[in-house]
Amino acid sequence: MDNKNNKAITNQEVDFAAWYTDVVREAKLCEYSSVKGCLNYLPNGYAIWENIKSILDKKFKETGVENVYLPVLIPESLLQKEKDHIEGFAPEVALVTRGGGEDLEENLCIRPTSETLFCDIWQHMVKSYRDLPLIWNQWNSVFRWEKTTRPFLRSREFLWQEGHTLHATKEEAFERTKMMLQVYYDFVTKDLAIPIICGQKTESEKFAGAEATFTIESMMKDGKALQSGTSHFFGSGFPDAFGIKFTDAQNKLHSAYETSWGLSTRIIGALIMVHGDNSGLVLPPRIAPTQIMIIPIAQHKDGVLDTCSKVYKSLEDAHFRVKMDISDKTPGYKFSQQEVLGIPLRIEIGPKDIENKQVAITRRDNHEKIFVKMENLLDNVKEILDSMQQEMYDRALKHLNENIYPATTIEEMLEIDKKNKGFIKAMWCGDAECEQKIKEKTNGYGSRCIPFEQEQISDKCVCCGKKAKHMVLWGKSY
Amino acid sequence: MDNKNNKAITNQEVDFAAWYTDVVREAKLCEYSSVKGCLNYLPNGYAIWENIKSILDKKFKETGVENVYLPVLIPESLLQKEKDHIEGFAPEVALVTRGGGEDLEENLCIRPTSETLFCDIWQHMVKSYRDLPLIWNQWNSVFRWEKTTRPFLRSREFLWQEGHTLHATKEEAFERTKMMLQVYYDFVTKDLAIPIICGQKTESEKFAGAEATFTIESMMKDGKALQSGTSHFFGSGFPDAFGIKFTDAQNKLHSAYETSWGLSTRIIGALIMVHGDNSGLVLPPRIAPTQIMIIPIAQHKDGVLDTCSKVYKSLEDAHFRVKMDISDKTPGYKFSQQEVLGIPLRIEIGPKDIENKQVAITRRDNHEKIFVKMENLLDNVKEILDSMQQEMYDRALKHLNENIYPATTIEEMLEIDKKNKGFIKAMWCGDAECEQKIKEKTNGYGSRCIPFEQEQISDKCVCCGKKAKHMVLWGKSY
């Protein structure tokens, strides 16, 4: 980027991790709080999350989801009811041991996830097939005692939604698991312009207590993977552990089937690292809290502010999310701010533009400057935003496709690791030991997923050479 | 109510407290969880909160509010920075003493409120007058170790919004305090149809750490008061305790001024107790998650379901929140459900209606049944909903006005308490000791507020007989 206005941001090519931290700080998205490992979500960052919530919540409700809110605390005994689950989460919980000035009889955990709370309600509520299905979701925060943290990517407390559903049949629960993965896929690809590989997690990587975990995986600009959303099929494990049974029309008792699915503020990290450039954030128009920033040029001259206000009003009336910066700062400073924040379009209006009955629109993603006649403004802005959304996706998809490499041996994987960044597709026998060995021998290429779209790279496991079962996507990850 | 369909609800006149508990249970709004004193907010209850959030958040943003999210935990030392504040909240905090399998060096409190967290951020962020004002808000849950709890009215964890703002001048901060009280007033009176008395809390009743607390007080059907929202002016107490100072244009250091303001899920308790009747909830149209329930009559007959679907579609397209119950349950059961849930309008459509090109609309609040021609449906539904909203407010206002009694002596107050339910307006000298004595001697009439609209009931304090300073509104409260 030649016209980089903010010098406080390290170049991506120099140090990607430093670039990320700089963008988060300069765009004032979030910051560490006084509570170790916990974030303050600041207005600019939280506004992105609000838009994510609003769009995704609408999509959920279209599939019949109802929202609830369950307690922030879980009694220790409740968390322990499902064996795999407590093994997965016990080391990470924060424990409340005192309340109201007294030691508690039973310690309470700050929820690391809420499967146990949902099952606890359902065991009282579900009696007959008429009570099913239950399609519930909550937008909340969860707490996991992480040792190392990074803004949005890993913090002790993070924001997410956790959907939990209960069904009369295995088939219906499985269908819901896949349906919600599809909702995530549609949202992330269409609204966030982030290309996705969908697949199933291996046994070692699946959620603590689940029978199957499905995932949407995305690739950052540095070639690393980010798990962007997961949908779990639980079977009857949890419901049985909680004694949830229902009677059918013939009064016969049956086990119920459960799912859960979640997407968190990590996705903001993906937004930054998939689209951002050396000037800062680049937000896809559909998710950007502000889509257009109007900046007057020579604003003291007759008619400039007046025209800016008229343009502002007409864009606002047409439901674009628009702001106008009429502060006494220089246009250069204002440009820099609009760029750091990733606002998709900048509209400059100066005396010459007014004379020519036009405005100058600059796209944030490719810095293209377009002169648009006033009379066509609304139509043109819509077209430009739509093109930008599509081209941002196409560009990211190209990057993803160009950075997946096939390998048939560990040596080939090492060779790829030396020359390239990105994902590796290679065959696997299905043995967890091989999966572990591959990660160790290749400097950290872990199994991201078994993609739904399989290819036959070879017929042997990349590690042990035995008969291969699946093609696995391998990657270094956040 | 002659046509009461749900026998599981105690009559208000028999036992108001039991009626309340029955309505909360039968309408499936919330329930106690396995965590003592904590609620599960179920879909029907949470949907009301979602509507409250959505309307109020829009009003906030129109006044320049930005949303953030700060951590659920506060280090003990941080909570202790403001003396009055910690004295107010220390007995109620839940303490995290272990995390990640180890004892913590410093205990962490689950936030009972977040003044200290906001100040903690601002002390790093605010340097010059250019950094002010900061107009922030968060929608979150807070935790207070209450001993006795009631659904929505008092629970250990509850949902709310807490706005926190920081200003360069005392005047601006004071203006914001009053502005947000006005936002609450407008919202509660117009959208919730709950009449309000605005005023200032006495010194004993103000928020821990505030210089002045303003409140909106409402009256339940049993004559008790419910504090429905508060707005606090902090002066410089908190900012000074946190070392927040800013430089003006001449580089001179100044103290900053703070406000905070909150409205919680308690307001759902007010909605229930101001409008509810012996059949269940009665929700004002503007806040009702579902405004219209369509119930087919003789739905197996030709054309009935088809007509219902058409009516449903036309109402939905006109942005009414409408549902249709085409289950195989009896119309009587469906009526009962619609009544318990407080859905404002019921539309019945049967073969005779189709013949007459009409539908039968029944208002939830007064059980009035109106036949409306299909061709006028949309206009009429809008009119009926608007009238219902207004009449619900008028009815509640009449109840409030008819149940406020003037008193000039403690004896008169006791006399009123014997014969009536409601509020008492009486003069007060300003002495906290008198305030306390009045409460003790009158079976619990506490000071609700010093109303902005003052009257001269007498010139002497109702307790000590000395010169009166204010007219105070006294009431028993939730």
Image (spheres, coloured by chain):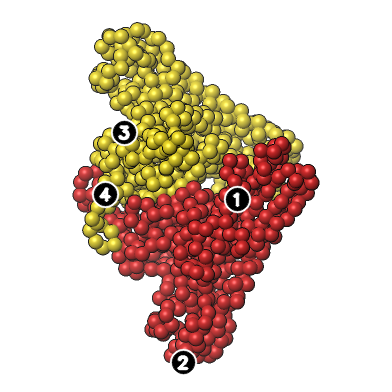
Chain colours: A red, B yellow
Q: Amino acid at mark 3?
A: Ala
Q: Amino acid at mark 2?
A: Gly
**Dot 2: within a 10 Å radius of its alpha carbon, few (fewer than 14), some, or many (20 or more) residues?**
some
Distance between mark 2 and mark 1 Cα atoms: 60 Å
- Which residue in the protein does label 4 denote? B95
- Which residue in the protein does label 1 denote? A332
Res. A49 visible in picture: no
- Residue A123 x, y percent position in the rendering: 38, 56
Q: Secondary structure at mark 1?
A: helix
- Residue B109 x, y percent position in the rendering: 29, 48
Residue at (49% x, 78% y) in the render: A474
Distance between mark 1 and mark 3 Cα atoms: 46 Å
Do tags 1 and 3 sit on the same chain?
A: no
Dividing the picture into quarters, in which one does residue A241 lie? bottom left
Distance between mark 4 and mark 1 Cα atoms: 49 Å
Residue at (69% x, 38% y) in the render: A301
**A64 shown above or below A427:** above
**Dot 1: within a 10 Å radius of its alpha carbon, few (fewer than 14), some, or many (20 or more) residues?**
few
- Which residue in the protein does label 3 denote? B208
